[in-house]
Image: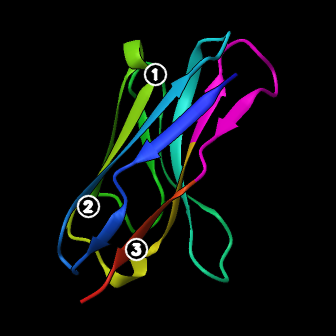
């Protein structure tokens, strides 16, 4: 059974930092792209950042320069270092992983709440 376990969310003041982690285990496939999405109340889920197995990265609007995505392939783990946090970064953050060489197979985490407030 595949498990996607996220951690690191919480409450932080504007300008502060948080680090999210997500580990995927139990997959019979390797893991290709890994990503973080977020969804604020009343909004659609949006891409925050994605990283390929080789380390290529792409960031969503408004986070580049403040957020950094990284991964450890041997552990099927992805991280999101968030700095200079703003109130508008408040959302539930979801981890997403794409199975390698398995068309249409992907995994989602349960979500972790990030609240930026003074």
56, 111: nearer the viewer? 111
Give the residue drawn at x 46%, y 22%: 76
9, 60: nearer the viewer? 9
Give the residue drawn at x 61%, y 81%: 41
Q: Count up the numbered dots.
A: 3
Structural distance between the alpha carbons of marks 1 and 2: 23 Å
Q: Which residues are magenta?
A: 96-110
Q: Is residue 8 above or below residue 22?
A: below
Residue 89 spot, x, y in % from top left: 40, 73
- Pointer 2 local density, CA inside 10 Å: few below 14, some 14–19, many at least 20: few
Residue carrying label 3: 89
Residue 40 appears in the rendering: yes
Give the residue drawn at x 38%, y 75%: 115
Residue carrying label 1: 76
SS state under label 1: loop
Seen from this angle, which residue lies furthest bottom? 118
Queried whether the magenta region covers residue 107, the answer comes back as yes
Question: In which quarter of the view is residue 54 placed?
Answer: top left
- Specify how the rendered protein is coloured: rainbow
């Amino acid at each position: 059974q595949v498990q996607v376990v996220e951690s690191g969310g919480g409450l932080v003041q504007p300008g502060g930092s948080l680090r999210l982690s997500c580990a995927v285990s139990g997959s019979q496939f390797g893991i290709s792209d890994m990503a973080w999405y977020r969804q604020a109340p009343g909004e659609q889920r949006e891409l925050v950042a994605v990283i390929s197995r080789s380390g290529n990265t792409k960031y969503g609007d408004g986070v580049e320069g403040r957020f950094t995505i990284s991964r450890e392939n041997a552990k099927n783990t992805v991280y999101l270092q968030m700095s200079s946090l703003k109130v508008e970064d408040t959302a539930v953050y979801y981890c997403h992983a794409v199975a390698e060489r398995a068309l249409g197979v992907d995994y989602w985490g349960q979500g972790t709440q990030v609240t930026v407030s003074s």
